[in-house]
């Protein structure tokens, strides 16, 4: 077995553990059953009336044994997004600044979890505290899922140019990990195309480099601690700043 497949296997083991942990603690947003109902309703009304809304089943693998979440396309931009979130995350979830993450194409369950974590103060890195705690608290409870679904349904950021040497170094780590440090391959959980794996493993493809580096540093410093089983804290602790920079350049290019 090559070192790369060992690192991938190590990642898969951790992946399974994380998936089980998440499944045991589903998001506490009330009316967990509602989004399906809401989407079905939207389908019933909008598709018959305007034929504008297509509702399709996400083709991603299911980790929790539940039915795959529905992904709706052609959703109307919620007023909250227009009036508030768009200032930093862009109207379609592609943000103009490196410190503000793209939300477009991010998994809906992951987005809901992050919003909940900001609201409970379990995601508490400095920018979370200074900006997102207040923003998340301002979202009415019954709007959390619709805002998340809106961003999830937007087209993810395309790959961006990044320095070739960094991209090459990042690619090696992303697909192969580093066996001597027991660093698992990122690919095991974030997918071979960096689009993430539903429901809980976030998309990294096309994400801003500054944001990726800031999150890896926050996991390493222990200021972001909302990852179950400290999965990302354990991984980031093994990364040097140079490796983080390379990984950020690589995923930015995906
Ligand atoms: C003033 C700028 C600003 C506004 C307005 C804003 N955000 Fe954010 N958002 C941020 C920053 C900065 C971060 C990164 C926080 C961190 O580093 O932990 C973030 C992170 C997030 C994340 C986590 C993304 C990830 O990949 O983990 C979500 C989800 C999110 N915001 C949703 C929203 C929603 C929904 C709104 C509107 C109600 C909103 N934000 C409004 C600046 C903003
Ligand atoms: C065993 C599974 C696993 C592996 C392997 C893994 N990750 Fe993660 N990663 C996660 C999970 C789960 C989260 C979301 C944590 C949460 O719920 O907030 C995450 C979150 C992240 C985030 C924050 C994303 C955001 O939008 O805020 C970054 C950046 C990241 N991972 C980078 C990496 C890199 C780079 C590697 C490889 C060196 C890697 N991950 C390997 C499971 C994994």
Image (cartoon, rainbow, N blue to C red):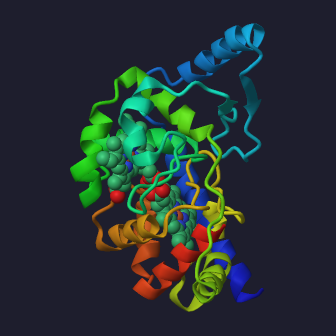
On the rendered structure, is 133 left or right of 63?
left
Q: In which quarter of the image is residue 85?
A: top left
Q: Can residue 117 be seen in this view?
A: no
How far from the left and from the top, in percent, is residue 52? 73, 20
In the image shown, does 107 or 29 lie closer to the viewer?
A: 107
The residue drawn where x is 43% and y is 74% is: 236
The residue drawn where x is 32% and y is 52% is: 123
Image quarter in which the N terminus is found: bottom right
On the rendered structure, is 199 left or right of 100?
right
Q: Which residue lies furthest to the left in this view?
A: 130
How far from the left and from the top, in percent, is residue 48? 77, 8
Q: Is residue 212 visible?
A: yes
The residue drawn where x is 68% and y is 74% is: 8
The residue drawn where x is 30% and y is 39% is: 135
Figure label count: 0
Q: In this view, does 253 lie above or below 66?
A: below
Image quarter in which the C terminus is found: bottom right
Q: In this view, does 33 lie above or below 159?
A: above
Q: Quadrant of residue 14?
A: bottom right
How far from the left and from the top, in percent, is residue 244? 47, 79
How far from the left and from the top, in percent, is residue 102? 50, 52
Q: Which residue lies furthest to the bottom in this view?
A: 180
Q: In this view, does 219 lie above or below 244?
A: above
């Amino acid at each position: 077995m090559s070192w790369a497949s060992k690192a991938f296997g190590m990642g898969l083991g951790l992946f399974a553990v994380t998936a089980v942990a998440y499944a045991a603690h589903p998001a506490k947003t009330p009316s967990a059953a509602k989004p399906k109902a809401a989407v079905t309703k939207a389908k019933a009304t909008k598709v018959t009336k305007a034929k504008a809304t297509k509702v399709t089943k996400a083709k991603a693998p299911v980790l929790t044994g539940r039915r795959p979440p529905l992904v709706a396309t052609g959703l109307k931009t919620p007023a909250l997004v227009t009036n508030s979130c768009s200032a930093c995350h862009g109207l379609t979830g592609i943000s103009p600044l490196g410190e503000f993450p793209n939300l477009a194409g991010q998994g809906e369950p992951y987005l809901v979890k992050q919003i909940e974590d900001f609201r409970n103060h379990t995601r508490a890195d400095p920018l979370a505290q200074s900006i997102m705690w207040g923003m998340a608290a301002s979202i009415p409870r019954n709007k959390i899922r619709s805002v998340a679904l809106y961003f999830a349904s937007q087209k993810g950021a395309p790959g961006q140019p990044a320095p070739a040497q960094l991209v090459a170094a990042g690619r090696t780590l992303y697909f192969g990990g580093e066996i001597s440090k027991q660093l698992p391959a990122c690919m095991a959980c974030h997918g071979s195309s960096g689009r993430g794996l539903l429901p809980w493993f976030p998309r990294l493809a096309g994400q801003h480099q500054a944001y990726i580096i800031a999150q890896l540093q926050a996991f390493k410093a222990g200021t972001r601690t909302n990852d179950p089983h400290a999965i990302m804290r354990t991984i980031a602790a093994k990364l040097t700043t140079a490796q983080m920079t390379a990984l950020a350049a690589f995923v930015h290019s995906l």
